Amino acid sequence: MKKLITFLACGVTFASQAQQTLLNGNFENWDSVVAATPSFWLTSERESIGLNTAIKTTDAFSGSAIRLETKAGDGRVAFGYFVNSDGDPTQGQGGTPYTQKPSSLKGYFKGTVVEGDSAVLLLIFKKNGAIISNQQFKFPQSRNTYTAFDFSISLTENPDTVILAGAASNVVDNQNPPIGSIAYFDELSFDGIAITEQLPNSNFDSWETTTFYSLQNWTLLGGENARSTDAYKGRTAVKLSTQMGGEQVYGSALFYGSFSQDQFKGEAYFPYTKQNDTLVFYYKFNQVGGDTAVVFASCKKDVSTIGGAYVLLQPTTVYTRMEVPIVSFQAPDSLMLGFGVATGQVLAHLGSELWIDEVTLKSEPLNTTGLAHFLANKPVLQIYPNPCSNSLTVLTNGQTPLNYIIFDMNGKMMQHNQVIDSSIATSTLVAGLYVIHFYENNQLVSSKRFMKQD
């Protein structure tokens, strides 16, 4: 659902060498989480990676059900949702073919609803691209056991498309919902005279295993499957591509840092004091239908814009080195840095793609003695099982002993020690999501997320 108001899972920002401003500019470091997703449905797990906002549960009316929860993560709100196609359903985007005229939507609900909030189902029918019915069905009261519901559908003609979405919080009316609401949905179905069409897997009994990746230290907006092995150097690069959202194609963007920082009024600015610098990177750009690819930088001083850069990138089929001067008329206190493909366009085209790799500032070349060097010469450090219960196993071929620090999602240090016999005890941690940092000779070499379960 509305991606800009969800937790975007940009990864945990951690300290490396003190003088380094841009971290992970070679895009080698990604968090990965393996999660179950319901067949034929999209869920919030692709955005709130690792927070388990939409999960399979056997606490069901029948078989299995979907459990949604609104949670806090890294200072933002992540609400659990499911939807039957891509696009923003609150704007009538997306949908799947449906041609009958049901009179009601049935199913079963239970959950814990925070005061002032409500779980919600959003049902939209369309015909020839136009909305012909748009209804919200709210669940404002908590239910300890599964309760049947039967909502009347207002539909005067046969549609050709249907959108069905559900959320733990009523984000249709409130884009900043309170945390803590939990909703279970099961056995959704359409009813009415001669109704034979149902949405696939509307009983949430069929689930698939999916691996989700999130880029550490950077934020991706609007892009799916941005992790690319077509890299200029190393194992991975970022690929920004246009995406279909309902009947419209949208661009995507990449920002350094977190897209929501209170001190900079919700924009992706980070501390920066150099008056003149040069951004260096490598890129490829596959252009379709006149779509643009851009790199942009904006310098601020006391929240006023005082300089920066904005450059259109030319199409190229091979990785090309680019240098972009960043100039301010006085020393700034913060900088926003980003890349985009087909951003800000009224009409974008499927197939436009921008690959980016080896991003750095000329004043501080990419670190070749720390994390990048470690990863270039050793296999990726792996941890398993994830989720874990009593222990984590650590796999690496490094001979130097590793130390580790475990943080909760609020940044509180929970545990630290040396990795002994490739194992880390986790039995004392409470159930939840954690970040573990690994150090070799006091140099940060990897940062990963894991889930502790009871």
Image (cartoon, rainbow, N blue to C red):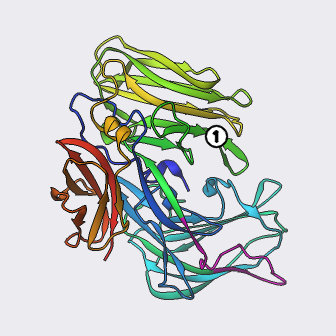
Vertical comparison of 242 with 169: above or below: above
> Is residue 197 on the magenta stretch?
yes
Q: Residue at x 65, y 64 (%)?
A: 84
Image coordinates of residue 408 in percent, x first then y, are 25, 59
Main SS category, magenta section: loop
Image coordinates of residue 171 in percent, x first then y, are 50, 60
For the image shown, how many numbered marks are present on the structure? 1
Q: Nearer the viewer, residue 97 or 313?
A: 313
| In the displayed structure image, the side of residue 224 where residue 145 appears, left or right | left
The residue that mark 1 highlights is 242
Residue 75 visible to the viewer: no
Which SS class for mark 1? loop
| In the displayed structure image, the side of residue 151 where residue 278 appears, left or right | left
> Is residue 349 on the magenta stretch?
no
Vertical comparison of 339 with 110: above or below: above
Locate the N terminus and report the quarter of the image it occupies: bottom right
Q: Quadrant of residue 353?
A: top right
Image coordinates of residue 192 in percent, x first then y, are 78, 83
Q: Quadrant of residue 344?
A: top right
- The amino acid pointed to by label 1 is Thr
Locate the C terminus and report the quarter of the image it occupies: bottom left
Q: Residues within 10 Å of mark 1 (few under 14, many from 20)?
A: many
Q: Residue furthest left?
A: 417
Image coordinates of residue 50 in percent, x first then y, are 41, 60
Q: Residue at x 71, y 60 (%)?
A: 95
Q: Residue at x 79, y 76 (%)?
A: 197
Vertical comparison of 85 with 120: above or below: above
| In the displayed structure image, the side of residue 90 where residue 304 appears, left or right | left
Residue 56 visible to the viewer: yes
- Magenta-tinted stretch: 188-209
